[in-house]
Image: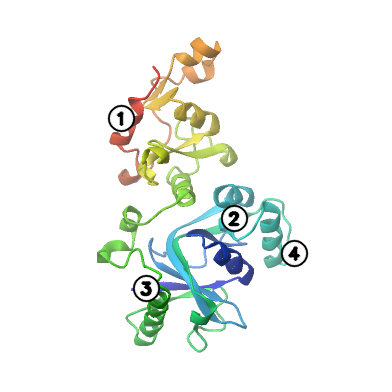
Amino acid sequence: MQFWLGVTDHRWFNFLSQRRLEEVNFWQPTATPPFKHLPIGTPFLFKLRAPNNCIAGGGHFVQFTKLPLSLAWDVFGEKNGCSSLTALHAHIADMANGDREPNPDIGCSVLTDVFYLSPENWIPVEGRFPRQAVRGRTYDTEISREAELWAMVQAARVKMGVEDQTANLEENRFGRDFLTHARLGQSSFRTLVIDAYHKRCAVTGESTLPVLEAAHIVPYANKGLHRISNGLLLRSDFHKLFDAGLMTVTTDYRIRVSSRIREQYFNGKAYNRLDGQQLQVVPEDPRDQPNPEFLRWHNERFAA
């Protein structure tokens, strides 16, 4: 098994460890991923910078994506490891040698099932982590010295009573199948849906990212899952109509617009003309496409 050991900023880690957040954005000031082809579900450990040089926690990798800074704050909020958008902007500027571009794209590694070790259980990596590795490196438990490091992490978790949510799953828990088992949160859901729809509105094809929102087909409050197949990427006005039952999507991916928009609001031409049309964008992967069962649930609540 492989795991990633990422170099971690102290301010970021201290902020999150105080709040014990289980889903976080391990961001970086550049939009280039620090790794290549990291499988979904890979253990992702936090190595504090010098002088600590210790593993202090970790989680499981969900996805790497590129987002404008303002949207990263909208999606993750304090899960970015900062108390405000202003603080996040300043933190990124510090790490980017003072560059204060107003809304830069940043790299976002989305992590779930995050755990934090108490300082007395931090694991020193001196001699096990190359000093020239600025961002991190991959380890492999097939290599005995690296397997020892993983065993130390697991022992520290047991000592603290931190449960590994994937420990008892089958071996294929890493890779795409991880998404069906992981405890994904709202932020993971949003980023996964955004990328599955290639940052375009399912209804209109609109690609102005700040106005696009990830909508649940079956709401989370109604036991809807944080799964891509339970999501649609919609322009914000269509999201509101969808949640209000004034618009739905049939199981053959056709748009239905309620006549009540015209009857109650004496307008709605911009929406009515879409009635009966096919969705403009659906995910390429069949596993990510809107689930017919979820769509039928929504269709039954549609205000025709």
Label placed on residue 296: 1
Q: Residue at x 57, y 71 (%)?
A: 8
User: In the image, which is nearer the foreground, mark 2 or mark 1?
Assistant: 2
Check disc 2 and report its element: helix, strand or loop. helix
Q: Earlier in the sequence, mark 4 or mark 3?
A: 3
Q: CA distance from mark 4 to mark 3?
A: 35 Å
Q: CA distance from mark 1 to mark 4?
A: 51 Å
Which residue occupies the foreground of this view, 77 or 106?
Answer: 77
Which residue occupies the foreground of this view, 211 or 81?
Answer: 81
Label placed on residue 95: none
65 in relation to 200, above or below: below
Query: In the picture provided, is 228 more to the left or to the right than 16?
Result: left
Q: Earlier in the sequence, mark 2 or mark 1?
A: 2
248 in relation to 161, above or below: above
Asked whether the residues under the numbered discs 1 and 3 touch, taking CB atoms below 8 Å apart as contact, a structural biologist would say no
Tell which residue pokes out farthest to the left in this image. Answer: 170
Which residue occupies the foreground of this view, 43 or 283?
Answer: 43
Q: Amino acid at mark 3?
A: Gln
Check disc 4 and report its element: helix, strand or loop. loop
Q: Residue at x 26, y 66 (%)?
A: 171
Query: In the picture provided, is 176 more to the left or to the right than 52?
Result: left
Residue tagged by mark 2? 78
Q: How is the image coloured?
A: rainbow
Q: How many marks?
A: 4
Q: CA distance from mark 2 to mark 4?
A: 22 Å
Label placed on residue 98: 4
Residue tagged by mark 3? 2
Q: CA distance from mark 1 to mark 3?
A: 40 Å
